[in-house]
Image (cartoon, grey):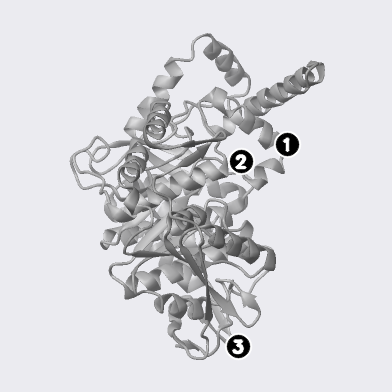
Amino acid sequence: MGTVRDGMWDLAFPPGPPERMAEMVSAAVVADAVRRYDADLAQSVETSRDWRHGHRRVFRGMTALAVSAPRVSLGIATEGLHSVRTVLRFAAGRTVTSLDAADMTDAAGAGLDTETVAGTATPAARLEVPWHGRLLAEDELRQQLAAWEERGIFEPGFVAAVRRVIDHPEWLRLPGFRLTAVGAAAELSPLRPLLAWGAEVLAVDRPGRARWDRLRAQARAGAGAMSFPVTAAGPGVDITRYLPALTHWIAAHTDARPALGLYAGLPGATGLRIAAASDVLAESLLREHPDAALALLGSPTDCYAVPESIVLAAREQLARRGIRGATQDVLHRLAPNSLYRLNYLRPVLDAEGARWGLFDNLPYLSGPDYALAQRLPRWRAVLAHSTGHTVSYTVAPPTWNSSVHESPWRAAAYRAATRFGIEVFDPATARVLLAAKLVADLMTPVEPAAGTPETAGGPANPETLFTVGAAHGGLWRQPFTPRSLLAPAAVSGSLQALRDRVGSALDPDD
């Protein structure tokens, strides 16, 4: 068994062509995950000649397979995560071994120092959500939540969770918990709201002077306390290189009930390595602390199985299109695969007889390494939940993040999103709402009820963990696939931006 003798190590792909290893690893893991439950699907992965472009069909099939029965969902998760630990490599000095064979408990001499920054503000007395230049609170926030639910922007479970926090502002400081935020500087990380509310947070993120200057400033401006690991080079650690030391560092701060929030991510092969390292950290913490909780955010650009109630809502929207629907139908006939393609064409039946739809919003260009990086935390979530751990998993809405502004075409599509029943959120709004949902999940865990239409009277399907409290921004209740709306929305948004510029130029008061 390999051991760790210092703090530095590398989580690496096995030897092979560097430009292809991430794709080869993702193919091997997915094939291993589904082989026991669909040998033909596994074989299609192993014989694929174009896995980079063909992976979306397989991930869609794997999602349908997972929702078919609880044992299948849990089995795919178990086999997939075991495969990750077998395929990826752990390198420390001259020792190279699999993640499964590495001794994560032996990290002598790998200690990390700790720095703590205490806030100077008064803890927030109530939940306040910034929205369009205003702060929504109390009844005004309840009314806006009701409007979002009515429009299908948030699922009822998400709205109910935020309402519980409105009713219990004493929960905001997370009494009894200490959250470790891995990827603390991420745009939708709950770090800033939790610090403003007076919580104690362990912040983990990559080194970088500018990044940690911002995080320290946020902590000082808040009302809580932020502790973070420090090496000889300064604050911050790369989770893919300091995992054993980081595991010990977190364990030294478990005098309160631990909650692990995983928010770190990057594109491409690096993102897959981060997801694998995050999962090893999660497994270690959950194994050592039976009362530990797990917190995760799901990407809106992924593939999910959604219950029949959401599919029916999408069909109702289709029926209410009016005259505009005739134009959309003509455009769809002209370009059936790229314009106004219907959502949820083929229902999936689970073992209890419940009907599900498949929401497929995996991007074409991100590749299989991105898709697998999104799937690893979902596998960990269903396994942790099945063993009794509190799990907060929330599908996040589309937001005006930095990558959107880098693409004029995508920014134009986002500007027109509301015309298609989709709301794109400012990160500051989404961050607070998602943090409130996290607080509610930790303080009052709510189990998906048996006997609902989603479960047809049997035990709750593990996949409901992703659907009950989703904040998808209206994407799921759309009658059309998001990909088939991109071009019409981009054209509409570009025309609106042009009209706005012309109007501004002609306005004598401007």
On the rendered structure, is 134 left or right of 169? Answer: right
Amino acid type, mark 1: Pro
Q: Which is more toward the observer, 143 or 492?
A: 143
Residue 418 visible in image: yes
Measured as percent of width and height from the top left, residue 45 is found at 51, 55
The image quarter in which residue 503 lies = top right
Q: Residues within 10 Å of mark 3 (few under 14, many from 20)?
A: few
Q: Which residue is mark 3?
A: 93
- Which part of the image, by quadrant, shows the C terminus? top right
The residue lying at 51 percent from left, 85 percent from top is 111
Which mark is nearer the camera, 2 or 3? 2
Q: Which residue is mark 2?
A: 400
SS under mark 3:
loop
Q: Which residue is mark 1?
A: 408
On the rendered structure, is 231 left or right of 477? Answer: right
Establish if 396 lies above or below 266: above
- Tell me the tag on residue 442: none
How many numbered marks are there? 3
Report if the CB atoms under discs 2 and 1 are less than 8 Å apart.
no
The residue lying at 62 percent from left, 62 percent from top is 269
The residue lying furthest to the top in this view is 323
SS under mark 2:
loop
Amino acid type, mark 3: Gly
Q: Give me the C-alpha separation between circle 2 and circle 3.
A: 42 Å
